[in-house]
Amino acid sequence: MKRRDVVVVGGSAGALQPLRSIVHSLPRDLPAALFVVIHVPPHSESVLPQLLTTWGKLPALHAVDGELIKAAHIYVAPPDHHLLVYPSHVRVIRGPKENRHRPAIDPLFRSAAGAYGERVIGVLLSGALSDGSAGLAVVKQAGGIAVVQDPEEALTPAMPRNALERVRADHLCRAEEIGPLLSRLVDVERPVVPVEAPPVVASEALPEPGGEVNGRAVYSCPDCGGVLVEGTEGGAPKFRCTVGHQLTEQSLIDGQQETLESALWAALRALEERASLLRSIGRRMRGVALSTAKHFDAQAREAERRAGLVRQALSATPEPGPERAAATDDG
């Protein structure tokens, strides 16, 4: 029996209920450690460890940078920090956002695969967008097990659905089935003791922050405005800027939409302020030089016309991406 004693769990919107079901069914003496990333607002006060402890038999806590890994414990990523798994210990860092999230699921899955290889079980739960898909693919490449919540029962099905499109999952389960499955997959005959780690599974063709790869970088990072370089991770396209922000295709599309909307609102404000200023100057000039006043009035009308076009663009509902469309279709 292969030793499976490192369980990494990721989710977003709608993940709390399946997570509750999972921890409720795990035994007190589970010979494995669980690591959990749930997308939370950066400045929120997370009570997830308290909830997990209440819901199940295993103690849960916010991970502390550098602490040693213990079996039968649940380590939760604190708000605004990535949770990484290293041989024998965890790291909790405020590194660059991935897929516009911190904590993000991909760094947890990727680091666990690099540190423990085939000993890892990756579990992806309900959520929107595509965080976790690339990380789950890396878990599979390292010899680990991929478990995905059935999108048909997920409150927000886009995340598990996206993962199934990119990863050949070993188990597709309803939430109530995942806990008992984990208990079976974990090797109950051998305790979790961190040992010499296998080689780190690196992102394919993605440079380290500040590095370069061959290829043409033509996109801007929506988080910092830096240049994005396209590579792959887990066989899927991924983009990284020079300071380390990483995005999947869908995260980049959503980031561009937010950047575009912000730019349009700024343009609308500038055009309306310009029109107001030109109107004011025109009024003052009417008693001095009528032709000059008409010139300013004409410029004001042109600014108002352009502002109207921008406002019309802002009022139009953008086409939803495939994942958002799927989530909408499923209610």
Image (cartoon, grey):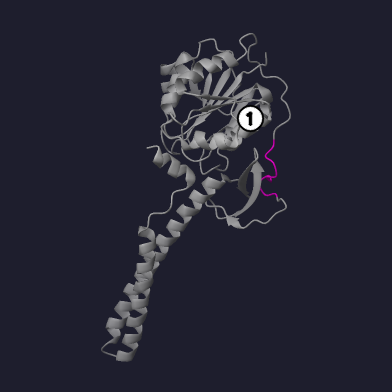
* Percent coordinates x, y for residue 4 in the rendering: 63, 18
Quadrant position of the N terminus in the picture? top right
Magenta: main secondary structure equals: loop
- Looking at the rendered structure, the kind of residue marked 1 is Val
Residue 132 shows in the view? no
In the displayed structure, does residue 156 sit left or right of residue 248? left
- Residue 200 x/y as whole percent: 71, 32
For the image, the number of numbered tags is 1
> Residue 187 location in percent, x, y?
62, 13
Furthest residue toward top: 189
Q: Quick one: 231 or 93, which is closer to the camera?
A: 231
Up-down relation of residue 302 to residue 6 (above or below): below
Q: Nearer the viewer, residue 317 or 274?
A: 317
Picture residue at 47% right of the left edge, 55% below the top = 259
Q: Quadrant of residue 311?
A: bottom left
Answer left or right for 48 relative to 238: left
- Residue closest to the far left: 287
Percent x, y of residue 109? 60, 31
Give whichever of 127, 307 is nearer the camera.
Answer: 127
Could you tell me which quadrant the C terminus lies in?
A: top left
Task: Please identify the quarter of the rendering in which residue 33 is found.
Answer: top right
Query: Is 199 colored magenta in this rendering?
Result: no
Q: Is residue 148 above or below residue 271?
A: above
**Who's the residue at 52% across and 46% down the image?**
250
According to the image, label 1 marks what residue?
A: 139
* Quadrant of residue 276 within the rendered picture: bottom left
Say what secondary structure mark 1 lies in: helix
Please tell me how crowded label 1 is: few (under 14), some (14-19), or many (20+) other residues with Cα within 10 Å: many
The part of the chain drawn in magenta is 202-211
Q: Is residue 229 visible?
A: yes
